[in-house]
Image (cartoon, rainbow, N blue to C red):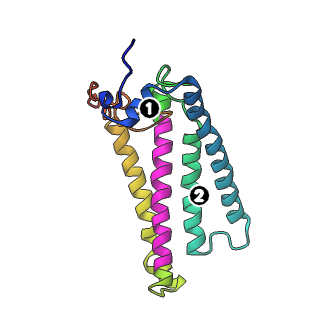
């Protein structure tokens, strides 16, 4: 009787799961981001259109912050919605891309994920200032707003450039993003992670 693989053999539950998932499970992992990414894209695009077409447009700090979150979420939705398609051929089910398309997807995912997260923090700071510190809209606009936009935008693009320059974008699961190579090497005791090519 063949010996069944154990979780301890692969160092973590994640590595074990990804090595021994079935075809149908893998198909679900590929299709799900396409569906959720499409819904997220439509939602973000609708919100952006509603803001720009309204009478108030981008006239308040709150609306500008929501606009920023929506733009970055839209970018992330495109990257996630492509799922495994841009990944190098052979790296995942449904992969039809190469290293360049993988980098493009990784840039979209990193920009979108980092930017929307940091803009959400900016929105929290906005509410904290309004509610706890009783800061007026004008006070936030004059003293704080520039940082609420500058930090997410600058940090996001610097992070993305660093990931590209140091070759840190690789296939991970069913998407290309900030990851070590080969896939899941951090979780597998028998696989050594490669050093960046650049």
Q: Is residue 131 magenta?
A: no
Query: Is 161 displayed left or right of 40 in the figure?
Result: left
Q: State if disc 1 and disc 2 touch (CB < 8 Å).
A: no
Residue 34 visible from this viewpoint: yes
Q: For label 2, count other residues whose C-alpha is less than 10 Å away and answer few (under 14), some (14-19) or many (20+).
A: many
At a point 36% along the width and 32% down the height, the residue shown is: 184
Residue 197 visible from this viewpoint: no
At a point 50% along the width and 83% down the height, the residue shown is: 131
At a point 26% along the width and 30% down the height, the residue shown is: 195
Q: Mark 2 against mark 1, which lies toward the viewer? A: 1
**Relative vertical location of residue 22 with respect to residue 105 in this rendering, above or below:** above
Q: For label 1, count other residues whose C-alpha is less than 10 Å away and answer few (under 14), some (14-19) or many (20+).
A: few
Magenta segment boundaries in residue numbering: 104-128
Could you tell which of marks 2 and 1 lies nearer the N-terminus?
1
Query: Is 91 displayed left or right of 195 in the figure?
Result: right
Query: Is 40 displayed left or right of 135 in the figure?
Result: right
Q: Which residue is mark 1?
A: 17
Q: Which one is in front, 54 or 88? A: 88
């Amino acid at each position: 009787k063949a010996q069944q693989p154990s979780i301890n053999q692969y160092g973590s539950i994640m590595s074990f799961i990804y090595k021994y998932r079935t075809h149908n499970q893998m198909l679900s992992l590929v299709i799900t981001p396409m569906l959720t990414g499409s819904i997220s894209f439509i939602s973000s695009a609708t919100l952006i259109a509603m803001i720009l077409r309204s009478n108030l447009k981008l006239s308040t700090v709150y609306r500008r912050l929501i606009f920023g979150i929506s733009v970055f979420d839209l970018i992330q939705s495109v990257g996630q919605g492509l799922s495994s398609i841009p990944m190098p051929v052979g790296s995942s089910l449904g992969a039809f891309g190469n290293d360049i398309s993988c980098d493009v997807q990784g840039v979209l995912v990193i920009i979108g994920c980092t930017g929307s997260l940091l803009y959400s923090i900016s929105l929290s700071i906005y509410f904290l200032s309004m509610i706890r510190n009783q800061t007026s809209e004008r006070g936030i606009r004059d003293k704080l707003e520039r940082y609420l936009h500058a930090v997410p935008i600058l940090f996001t693009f610097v992070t993305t450039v660093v990931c590209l320059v140091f070759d840190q974008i690789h296939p991970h699961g069913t998407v290309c993003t900030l990851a070590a190579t080969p896939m899941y090497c951090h979780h597998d005791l028998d696989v050594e992670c490669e050093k960046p090519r650049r």
